[in-house]
Image (cartoon, grey):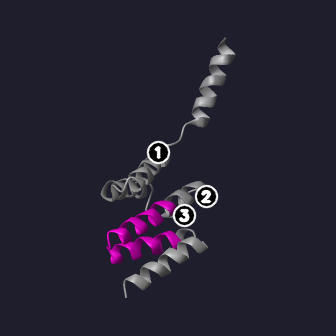
Amino acid sequence: MKQLTILLLLLLTIGCKNNADLTMERGIQYYEWNLVDKAILEFNQVVHMFPKDSRSLDYDQVQLLSQAHHNLAVAYAKKEWFTDAEREARSAFELVPSSENRRVLDLIQDKSL
């Protein structure tokens, strides 16, 4: 019985998402419900959960932080706050220089001209 309890606790610990992941998911859900202001608050919360100096972060944390900046860029662009959107898109691209992050940055820069 003791082994079963330990196994269940281990599975729960491994299966549980951390606070930043849950906050990100909540932000995505708010965005999908067109509650953009609430989504922005959630994505900002994710950004503030990590240190300013990203060199101490592991791979998954860098990915999540980049995604938070990316999502902020998209949400700001939806509100037509292009200066803020460009700043966030640039942060996302600097963390993870992916094609998707570059595409969003380029689109926002085109809109802000």
- Of discs 3 and 2, which sits in the foreground? 2
Q: Earlier in the sequence, mark 1 or mark 3?
A: 1
Q: Nearer the viewer, residue 76 or 92?
A: 76
Q: Which residues are magenta?
A: 67-94
Label 3 – label 2 distance at C-alpha = 10 Å
Q: Disc number at residue 108? A: none
Which amino acid is tagged 3? Arg
Residue, disc 3: 55
The reply to whether callout 3 and callout 2 are in contact (CB within 8 Å) is no
Q: Disc number at residue 59? A: 2
Taking the spot 63% from the left edge, 29% from the top edge, the residue there is 10
Residue 31 pos. (x, y %): 40, 56
Q: Quadrant of the C terminus?
A: bottom left
Seen as rendered, the residue at the extreme bottom is: 113
Image height of 91 relative to 13, above or below: below
Residue, disc 1: 22
Which amino acid is tagged 2? Tyr
Magenta stretch contains residue 6: no
Image height of 5 relative to 108, above or below: above
Circle 2: element type: helix
Q: Earlier in the sequence, mark 2 or mark 1?
A: 1
Q: Nearer the viewer, residue 38 or 55?
A: 38
Taking the spot 42% from the left edge, 48% from the top edge, the residue there is 26
The reply to whether callout 1 and callout 3 are in contact (CB within 8 Å) is no
- Of discs 1 and 3, which sits in the foreground? 1
Label 1 – label 3 distance at C-alpha = 23 Å
Circle 1: element type: helix
Image height of 90 relative to 23, above or below: below
Q: How many marks?
A: 3
Left or right position of 100 against 45: right
Taking the spot 42% from the left edge, 70% from the top edge, the residue there is 88
